[in-house]
Image (cartoon, grey):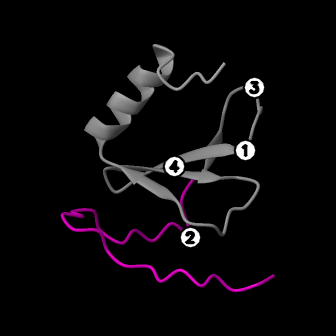
Amino acid sequence: MAESTIDQHPLAGWEKPDLDLSKADWRSSSRGLGDVQIAFIEGFIAMRNGGSPHSPSLIFTPAEWGAFVLGAREGEFDLT
């Protein structure tokens, strides 16, 4: 696999710690559909692609996660 040519730089205002996700308890949806997995760790919520678990994870604060879940429930991200 080719190495990424994109440099990883912290975002301005990024207030989230570098979390050790190596021992996170990753959970899939109750139906086991799709590849999205989440883990609750150190007061944050991590989300990753379960089909590619070594790719970067998204990290949410509880408030960000709540807004994301509410938006998903209301169809905000429905592309159909």
Front label number (1 vs 3): 1
Give the Cα distance between marks 4 and 2: 11 Å
Local crowd size for mark 1, using a 10 Å CA cut-off: few (<14), some (14–19), many (≥20): few
For residue 77, above or below residue 44 = above
Give the Cα distance between marks 2 and 3: 24 Å
Residue type highlighted by circle 1: Asp
Instruction: Tell me which segment is drawn in magenta.
Output: 1-25
Instruction: Of the two numbered discs 4 and 2 on the same chain, state the one appearing first in sequence.
Output: 2
Q: Are marks 2 and 1 in contact (CB under 8 Å)?
A: no
Give the Cα distance between marks 4 and 1: 13 Å
Residue at image x 66%, y 18%? 80
| Mark seen at residue 39 | 4
Per the image, label 1 sits on a secondary structure element best described as loop
Magenta part mainly helix, strand or loop?
loop
Q: Circle 1 is placed at which residue position? A: 35
Q: Circle 2 is placed at which residue position? A: 22
Residue type highlighted by circle 3: Arg
Q: Are marks 4 and 1 in contact (CB under 8 Å)?
A: no
Per the image, label 3 sits on a secondary structure element best described as loop
